[in-house]
Amino acid sequence: MEFDGFSVAVDAAGQRGDIILDRGEFNTISMDERDELRAAFEILDRDPRVRVIVLRAAGEHFSSGGFIRGFLEAAPELVSKLADNVAAPARCEKPVIAANRGYTFGVGFELSLACDFRIASETVQYALPEQRLGQIPGSGGSARLQKIVGITRTKDIVMRSRRIKADQALAWGIATEVVPDDRLEAATDALVAELVTFSPIAQRTAKRLLNETEECHLGTAIELEGHCYSRLRQSDDFREGVLAFHEKRPPQFKGS
């Protein structure tokens, strides 16, 4: 399939699917591309060959953000779907990794925030620059960021259109890991290789539980965690994990 501004690759042997942003030097993201990105995440989430999804980009910048003129040209019905499209990585049952380098602005940052892991190059700069356009983030960026760094730091980033570099992103919990620029691909590969060793059903359960209990009262979250734990006790993967531990061998998880 041909996509608008990106490509998709599946490595069946590595059990990974990649979405690669590729639109010129700054990888701007068009309005139509957002719909296609959502569809690509959904396709990879259903692909049985894929255990982990990676969102990355060609070139020295992940994305400078959206195609600005597109906001003026887009119909209100399309604009109202922006946040839903950008939330596609969070809705995926499988783990999603964002590999960020260089400019990671606007919708590029919002897409990355919707992923489970953000591996950042030392060259990364994160920003939500919409205030410079007389606008605010419209695809979940300020809301997701506030959950990660709190209201004070989010106001500092959003209301000042402030750029956050790699070391600060790591200190504030925005980035999962920061690596030298020439090690970004290797670090992403290593995380994929680690994640595929775990039980697919346990990974899906953990992601859904963490996402759905983020807003819960502590007691409710603990109760839901207990229900999930109880269900997983009945799984083939849990039995295999216990047997492998006692037999001192790597487990062979099947996802059931």
Image (cartoon, rainbow, N blue to C red):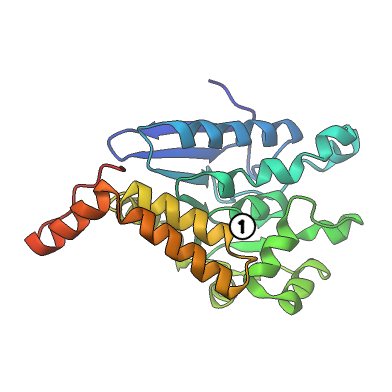
Task: Give the left or right position of residue 137, taking residue 116 as reference.
Answer: right
Q: Quadrant location of residue 100?
A: bottom right
How many numbered marks are there? 1
Q: Which residue is drawn at 75% across and 79% down?
A: 152
Question: Please, what secondary structure does the residue beneath circle 1 have?
Answer: helix
Indicate whether 204 appears above or below 210.
above
Task: Give the left or right position of residue 227, taking residue 250 as reference.
Answer: right
Answer whether residue 233 is visible to the viewer in this image. yes
Q: Residue at x 58, y 37 (%)?
A: 22
Q: Residue 144 location, x and y as percent?
A: 67, 61
Indicate whether 6 appears above or below 62.
above
User: Which is more toward the observer, 8 or 42?
Assistant: 42
Q: Residue at x 61, y 57 (%)?
A: 113
Quadrant of the image containing the C terminus? top left
Query: Quick one: label 1, few (<14), some, or many (20+) residues within 10 Å?
Result: many
- The residue type indicated by label 1 comes to Leu
Q: Residue 48 location, x and y as percent?
A: 37, 32
Task: Give the left or right position of residue 134, taking residue 21 as reference.
Answer: right
Indicate whether 246 appears above or below 173.
above
Q: Which residue is drawn at 37% across and 54% down?
A: 231
Q: Residue 252 location, x and y as percent?
A: 19, 47
Answer whether residue 117 is visible to the viewer in this image. no
Q: Residue furthest top?
A: 1
Task: Give the left or right position of residue 96, taking residue 161 as reference.
Answer: left
Q: Mark 1 points at which residue?
A: 113
Q: Which residue lies furthest to the left in this view?
A: 247
Q: Residue 25 location, x and y as percent?
A: 63, 43
